[in-house]
């Protein structure tokens, strides 16, 4: 999912628009996780980027997307770019101490 969200609407209040963005991202990730895993893959991982524009977007961890969206709301941004791409993930064993 590569999308620039515009957060201005004549009838819908801004906090509801931000909640809608969060819902759409969660829905996309949930849908991607339901897809069948290829052989040799443990789980679906995600590459995420966030920024005011596509050119200035920086990589972020999927668990931190909500924090970045909340910061955008505090900064009263009128639009921002989010990219969430699914990729195969492999579990790694934690090193023993």
Image (cartoon, rainbow, N blue to C red):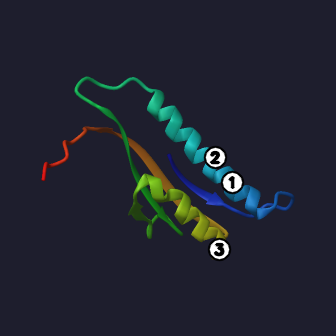
Query: In the rendered image, which residue does mark 1 sit on?
Result: 19
The residue drawn where x is 25% and y is 39% is 91
Taking 8 as reference, is 86 above or below it? above
Residue 55 image offset from top left, x and y in percent: 44, 67
Q: Can you give x and y, in whole percent of width and height, for residue 59 in the image?
A: 38, 61
Label of residue 23 in the image: 2
Residue 56, image x and y in percent? 44, 70
Q: Residue at x 64, y 52 (%)?
A: 21
Expressed as whole percent of the image width and height from the top left, the position of residue 90 reads: 25, 38
Between the residue at mark 3 and the residue at mark 1, the CA separation in whole angstroms equals 13 Å
Check if mark 1's residue and mark 2's residue have beta carbons within 8 Å: yes
- In the figure, 68 relative to 33: above or below? below
Cα distance, mark 1 to mark 2?
6 Å
Q: Nearer the viewer, residue 95 or 73?
A: 95
Q: On the image, numbered disc 3 is attached to which residue?
A: 74
Mark 2, secondary structure of its residue: helix
| On screen, residue 38 above or below 53 | above
Quarter of the view holding residue 5:
bottom right
Given the current orientation, which residue lies at the most extreme bottom position? 75
Query: How many residues crowd around disc 2 within 10 Å: few (fewer than 14), some, or many (20 or more)?
Result: few
Left or right placement of residue 48 versus residue 15 in this view: left
Give the camera-side residue of 88 and 57.
Answer: 88
Is residue 77 something that shows in the picture? no
Dividing the picture into quarters, in which one does residue 28 lie? Answer: top right
Is the residue under label 1 in contact with that under label 3 (CB below 8 Å)?
Answer: no
Crowd class of label 3 (few under 14; some 14 to 19; many from 20; radius 10 Å): few
- Precedes in sequence: disc 3 or disc 1: 1
Left or right, 95 with respect to 1, comes to left
SS for dot 1: helix
């Amino acid at each position: 999912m590569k999308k620039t969200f515009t957060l201005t609407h004549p009838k819908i209040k801004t906090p509801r628009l931000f909640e809608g963005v969060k819902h759409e991202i969660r829905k996309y990730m949930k849908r991607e996780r339901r897809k069948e895993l290829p052989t040799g893959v443990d789980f679906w991982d995600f590459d995420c980027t966030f920024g005011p524009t596509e050119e200035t977007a920086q990589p972020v961890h999927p668990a931190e997307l909500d924090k970045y969206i909340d910061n955008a709301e505090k900064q009263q941004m009128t639009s921002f770019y989010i990219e969430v791409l699914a990729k195969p993930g492999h579990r790694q064993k934690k090193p023993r101490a």
